[in-house]
Image (tube, rainbow, N blue to C red):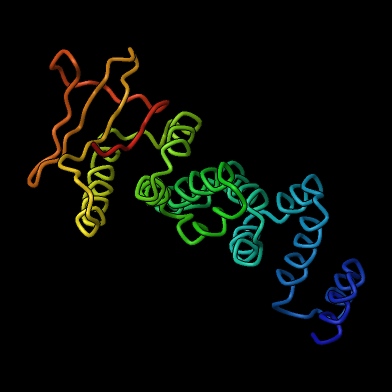
Amino acid sequence: VLLIRRLLSLKQYSLARQIRHIFVVPNIKNEIEESYVLHLLEQSDTTTALKTLVELGADSVKIVETLQEKIQDNTTKLFLVQFLMMNMASTLSSETFQALSIREMGIKVLLKLSPEQQGQYRKLVDYPKLIIESLIMDEQAAHVSRLLHDIPKLRDDDMIILYASKALDFRRTKTEEQPAERKRESLTLTTPTSTPAMATKSSKSLTLTAADGTPPRISPLSISLSLS
């Protein structure tokens, strides 16, 4: 085993496989292939990495799960998640497949953000809607609009209103600590027909109405927070 691991550190993968086969070394196959696939991904050789993972069959699932913990690059993480979803779905439980779907969405969200923000929200990769909440709380309306437009599965009007309400509560607390005359808090949204919609936050509720008095649909293309 020590010899094989030494060969892996030298990137002598073919020789490591031969030694394993000749001496029938148990419980080392996945370690060899994991090291080889990691090397390929670090070299951006996704074509050979994909071919290798497919050839490994069911063994690739555990290898990919381990690699996801070792790899920091989000594009590579997305490649691994999509490999499992597209090639190994029949071997996965419905719960595991659902978790992978959510992680895929989370990685796509991170890839839409700046490198600095990716680092900031990396730990929320399995909770993409919490990333949206955090962006709303940080008043990053432009980012939220772009994400909802580019990733339709994230669209949830009730969630937007809820998190915007939280943001207004937070801003109200900050405002009350400052000597400013701000009597009303609101979330201004624009409907697909450009009809202004106002979500007014009182001490007890958040009211959303359009200019004509009807409940508007929220356009993911334009969301802004304002205080008046």
Residue 52 in picture, x, y percent from top left: 77, 53
Residue at x 16%, y 39% (from the top left corner): 184
Q: Quadrant of the C terminus?
A: top left
Task: Looking at this view, name the residue that lies furthest to the left.
Answer: 204
Q: Is residue 99 left or right of residue 30?
A: left
Residue at x 83%, y 55% (from the top left corner): 43
Residue 180 in picture, x, y percent from top left: 23, 49
Residue 154 in picture, x, y percent from top left: 40, 37
Q: Picture quarter containing residue 126?
A: bottom left
Q: Picture quarter containing residue 206?
A: top left
Q: Is residue 46 left or right of residue 104?
A: right
Q: Is residue 94 left or right of residue 189?
A: right
Which of 132 and 137 lies nearest the eye of the viewer? 137
Residue 141 in picture, x, y percent from top left: 41, 38
Residue at x 38%, y 45% (from the top left corner): 139
Residue at x 69%, y 77% (from the top left corner): 27
Q: Picture quarter containing residue 24?
A: bottom right
Q: Quadrant of the N terminus?
A: bottom right
Which of 46 and 181 lies nearest the eye of the viewer? 181
